[in-house]
Amino acid sequence: MNGWQRGISLFVMLFTAVLTPNAWGAVIGITNSQPLVFGKFVAGTGGSIIVSTSGARSPTGSVVLLSSGSGSAAQFNITGDAGVTYAITLPADNTVSLTDNSSHTMGVTSFISDPAVTGTLSGGGTATLTVGATLVVNNAQVTGEYSGSFDVTVNYN
Amino acid sequence: MNKNFQQHALKLATMSAIAMGLSTIAVDSYAANVASASANASPVAAISIALDNNNNLNFGKFVPGTGGTISVNAAGGRSVTGAILPLSNPAPGAARFNVTGDVNASYSITLPSNGTVILSDGATHTMAVDNFVSTPAAGVGTGNLGGGGSQQLSVGATLTVANGQVAGNYTANFNVTVDYN
């Protein structure tokens, strides 16, 4: 076999190995079904809002929550091999922020999830993951609608 | 020479194709095991309350007689107990406030406690004002700013008049507090 024939063979082998799904089970997948919502509040001189994995809000500092705009945890659906465990990767602190698209921002930190760190797919190969976090509210935060996005990763472990 | 060049070019092309093939399998937001979610938050204006058009709580003029009470309700209606003779001019009236803030927000209303508001004639004579009432009523989340982001809040109370209360003009200030809930 000459040089280029070996090259082509190598290319075909690599192509096959990379693009064929794992022959022993399903690829793990995750989709988002609900956003993370911090709701309505008055910033005052600042503080934070913690949204728990159940969607309950807790203010700190001088932040006042309005019941007319409640919060909710983000929700994800995971699929894969039945009974297999998986690891969850949440955004690190200082990587996510919300903006009003008019130069005003608020950081989102301390992401938490349920399950936390790892989970197990059900007998049907599914799992539900809820994600909360802490919104950092600045002194005299300008009023408006702020939004942003974040990624959640799952891997078999 | 030509054949070697062709072989060399094909090897390079093959290696480039492999490199490109591998680089497109890098994990990003579009990979099956990564999902992106949106997050949002809505800071809104603080709630505020202000007296509307100088509509103060006014018990009006009256002859105290042997004393009793005068009540002004949140609608501005006046009733008396005891031997008090109410006079019609000036007319009595409830205090009226405008509460403003975020649309459809509910809010709590706090009125003065009994024993905290005392009218004085500026000399040594006083009359206590108690049993504050309001529309909407005092309490947690009893108010709602509706689609216009505002609501009128009316406040009444009961004045205790002593037997032979000394004639004069008796005044005091009182506070009403509102908070989003």
Image: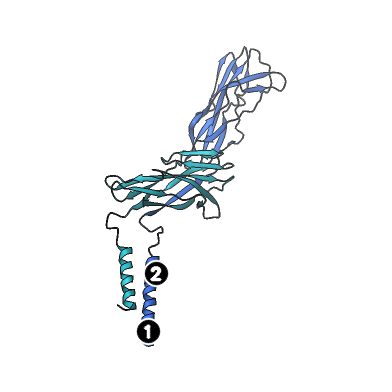
Q: Amino acid at mark 2?
A: Ala
Quadrant where the N terminus of chain B lies?
bottom left
Q: Nearer the viewer, residue A113 or A24?
A: A24
Q: Judge whether A23 appears above or below A140 on screen.
A: below
Residue B110 falls in image quadrant: top right
| Residue A58 visible within the image | yes
Circle count: 2
B63 with respect to A86 (left or right): right
Rendering coords of residue B145 (x, y %)? 49, 39
Q: Point out which mark residue B4 bears.
A: 1
**Badge 1: chain ID:** B
B73 with respect to A28 (left or right): right
- Which residue does the numbered mark 2 point to in the structure image? B19
Chain identifier of the blue chain: B
User: Residue at horizontal 53%, vertical 49%?
Assistant: A106
User: Residue at horizontal 35%, vertical 56%?
Assistant: B32
Check the image and name the residue furthest to the bottom: B1
Q: Nearer the viewer, residue B114 or B52?
A: B114
Q: Nearer the viewer, residue A105 or B104?
A: A105
A79 with respect to A56 (left or right): left
Rendering coords of residue B71 (x, y %)? 56, 21
Q: Amino acid at mark 1?
A: Asn
